[in-house]
Image: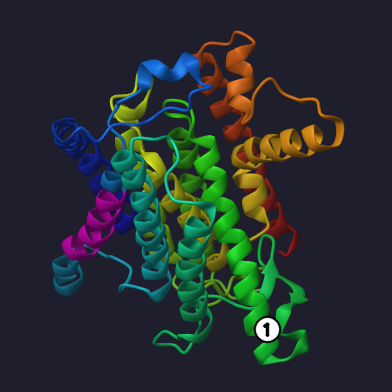
Amino acid sequence: MVNVMLAGGISTAVALLGTPFLIRFLVRRRYGQFIRDDLTHHHVKRGKPTMGGLVIIAATIVGYLGSHALLLPLRATGVVEVAPNPLSLGALLVLFLLVGLGVVGFLDDYTKIRKERSLGLTSRQKLAGQTLVTVLFALAALLATDAQGRSPASTAVSLARDTGLDLAFAGPAVALVLFLVWANVLITGASNGVNITDGLDGLATGASVMVFGAYTMISMWQFSQSCQNAAGPGCYTVAGALDLAVVSAAIAGACLGFLWWNASPAKIIMGDTGSLSLGAALAGMAILTQTQLLLVLLGGLFVIVTASVIIQVVGFKLTRKRVFRMAPLHHHFELIGWSEVTIVTRFWIVSGICVAAGLALFYGEWAAHR
């Protein structure tokens, strides 16, 4: 798909070429990262430019809108055959999550810088911001409709497509409330998961490239096998699937371009501005492509790292002993002697395995319906 490749290419170029300008700006303003006192082996990173998520968000928007703008004359003249692909409500909602949680993350990062400490917003403040953005997203995704009268989201819980478990079993009003709660669990969980994983140079960025790349493939497949293009027992009813592939490719490309500067030794850190926004966008893609529970497998690395924190906290409260030397999990491996590059590389491999398994499950589910 020309528009998907354009979006990914433009966002990659913008992030790759634009990040050095952001680095110089942040250095001049002395907007640097503060490190927890117990992470003595990371004190060398103290003062490193943070809030790199700004360039990821900007590159995504430029890539997404730029791909549409460049194809307008081609569609009009018919010189190149391009599938009709107007701006879709679903893709715009993903961008809303990306920007909305990016604002929450920016406030968190800025608070750390202004108060010169490693802790930014309080848990309540951060949760309030995440909830506000999530509620607005969920209401629009469920109640707004496109030109064909379809809502981007449904009240059914989904795996590789909507399952028989529908939150509408208790009536529309209760279904709306349950959907708001369910969307909040997914978005808050995913955004915090990426945030927790973002502890080593390039770790969360590289994993995000893989997962958003997977969602690009999933959305493109859902478009090609949609009930409009390939009617049959295994067809998909996802609204705006092709445009979801465009926005997902734009995010993947933005992360890829940023990774050039974020890989070890990182010249810039994405900060909460990047990690919270990327996690929220992942959850948005899962909700709108009807693959909510599949995100647990596709984003398996984020789940594993988050689970290590839960295990550490619960284990210590129950036994007064630590399961890991330090949580999240990547810091445990640092303390047992693994180098940062080794940990990141091996965790990327784990992420790749999870993505491959998720795509296999998605395809296997489609094949079973044929």
Residue in view at x 22 percent, y 36 percent: 19
Q: Is residue 230 left or right of residue 99?
A: right
Q: In this view, does 279 lie above or below 258?
A: below
State the residue in front, 25 or 83.
25
- Residue range (magenta): 57-71
Q: In this view, does 34 lie to the left or right of 335?
A: left
Q: Does residue 219 appear in this view? A: no
Residue closest to the far front: 115
- Assign a secondary structure to mark 1: helix
State the residue in front, 223 or 320.
320
Q: In this view, does 87 lie to the left or right of 298?
A: left
Question: Measured from the top left, where is residue 189 in percent x and y?
Answer: 60, 53
Q: Is residue 230 left or right of residue 29?
A: right
Q: Does residue 45 appear in this view? A: yes
Q: In which quarter of the image is residue 343?
A: top right
In reply to whether residue 114 is colored magenta, the answer given is: no
Residue in view at x 42 percent, y 53 percent: 277
Question: Measured from the top left, where is residue 125 in percent x and y?
Answer: 47, 59
Q: Quadrant of residue 17?
A: top left
Q: Main secondary structure of the magenta part?
A: helix
According to the picture, the residue beneath numbered tag 1 turns out to be 175
Amino acid of disc 1: Ala
Question: Measured from the top left, where is residue 309 in percent x and y?
Answer: 67, 36
In reply to whether residue 58 is colored magenta, the answer given is: yes
Question: Measured from the top left, where is residue 310 in percent x and y?
Answer: 71, 40
Residue in view at x 72 percent, y 91 percent: 171
Residue in view at x 31 percent, y 28 percent: 260
State the residue in front, 319 or 201.
319
Q: Quadrant of residue 42?
A: top left
